């Protein structure tokens, strides 16, 4: 009987401790101060108190989210771009991509950015995956789409954009992610995610 009561008391204590932990987490008062606002993102400082009462703060970049598009011209050829990136002052090989407008659906962003950067219009825009690019400092969520049934047209580049298309076969695109010709993280991730999908589909058919 004593053992049973001890067990129940321990369980009750554990439940209280768990509830206290949740309560402490939920009642931590967080404040946010904007440090910088730009056209595409905001830099903010978060301030809060730890469960032990220690004041904490951290800065982060708040971003509306973005899309990456894999434009498949045929079952074995993809349209990449050469894109000069001012942040690293290099021209990188990437997939077309772009930032969402406020409240814009990711698929609509993908359709718009594909046309603006490559000139291609997509008859089909299929969602593939989404992921956070660098959640330690940035809340940008990247949505990946596969574009097919493409038709060519004019581009609509922004004044600061220096972009040209690069059409390559699929195997070479994957090789570029391995040998270092492609160093853009979202492009590497998206291409390998879709490559796995292609291999899984191929295995199912065989």
Image (cartoon, rainbow, N blue to C red):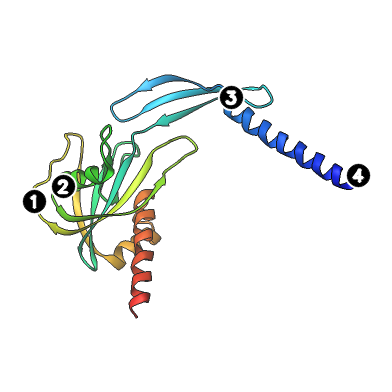
Please give the residue where the numbered disc 3 appears in the rendered image: 28
Categorize mark 1 by other alpha carbons within 10 Å: few (<14), some (14-19), many (20+).
few
User: Which sits earlier in the primary sequence, circle 2 or circle 4?
Assistant: 4
Helix, strand or loop at label 4? It is: helix
Q: Position of residue 15 (x, y in %)?
A: 71, 38
User: Which sits earlier in the primary sequence, circle 1 or circle 3?
Assistant: 3
Categorize mark 4 by other alpha carbons within 10 Å: few (<14), some (14-19), many (20+).
few
User: Which sits earlier in the primary sequence, circle 1 or circle 4?
Assistant: 4
Alpha carbon separation for disc pair 1 and 3: 53 Å
Badge number at residue 115 = 2
Badge number at residue 2 = 4
Q: Position of residue 204 (x, y in %)?
A: 36, 75
Left or right: 203, with 105 as reference point: right
State whether residue 83 is above or below residue 201.
above
User: Which sits earlier in the primary sequence, circle 2 or circle 1?
Assistant: 2
Helix, strand or loop at label 1? It is: loop
Alpha carbon separation for disc pair 2 and 4: 74 Å
Please give the residue where the numbered disc 1 appears in the rendered image: 153
| Residue located at (20% from left, 45% from top) | 163
| Residue located at (30% from left, 45% from top) | 67
Please tell me in which quadrant of the rendered image residue 23 appears. Answer: top right
């Amino acid at each position: 009987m004593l053992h049973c009561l001890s067990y129940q008391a321990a369980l009750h204590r554990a439940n209280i401790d768990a509830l206290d932990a949740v309560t402490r987490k939920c009642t931590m008062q967080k404040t946010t101060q904007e440090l910088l606002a730009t056209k595409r993102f905001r830099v903010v400082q978060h301030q809060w108190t730890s469960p032990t009462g220690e004041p904490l703060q951290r800065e982060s970049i708040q971003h509306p989210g973005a899309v990456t598009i894999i434009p498949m011209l045929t079952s074995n050829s993809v349209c990449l771009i050469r894109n000069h990136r001012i942040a690293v002052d290099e021209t990188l090989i990437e997939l077309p991509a772009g930032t969402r407008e406020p409240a814009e659906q990711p698929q609509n962003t993908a359709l718009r950015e594909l046309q603006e950067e490559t000139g291609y219009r997509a008859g089909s825009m299929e969602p593939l995956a989404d992921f956070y690019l660098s959640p330690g400092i940035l809340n940008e969520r990247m949505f990946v789409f596969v574009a097919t049934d493409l038709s060519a047209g004019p581009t609509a580049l922004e004044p600061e954009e220096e972009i040209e298309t690069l059409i390559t076969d699929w195997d070479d695109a994957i090789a570029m992610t391995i040998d270092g010709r492609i160093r853009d993280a979202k492009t590497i991730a998206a291409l390998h995610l879709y490559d796995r999908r292609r291999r899984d589909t191929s295995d199912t058919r065989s």
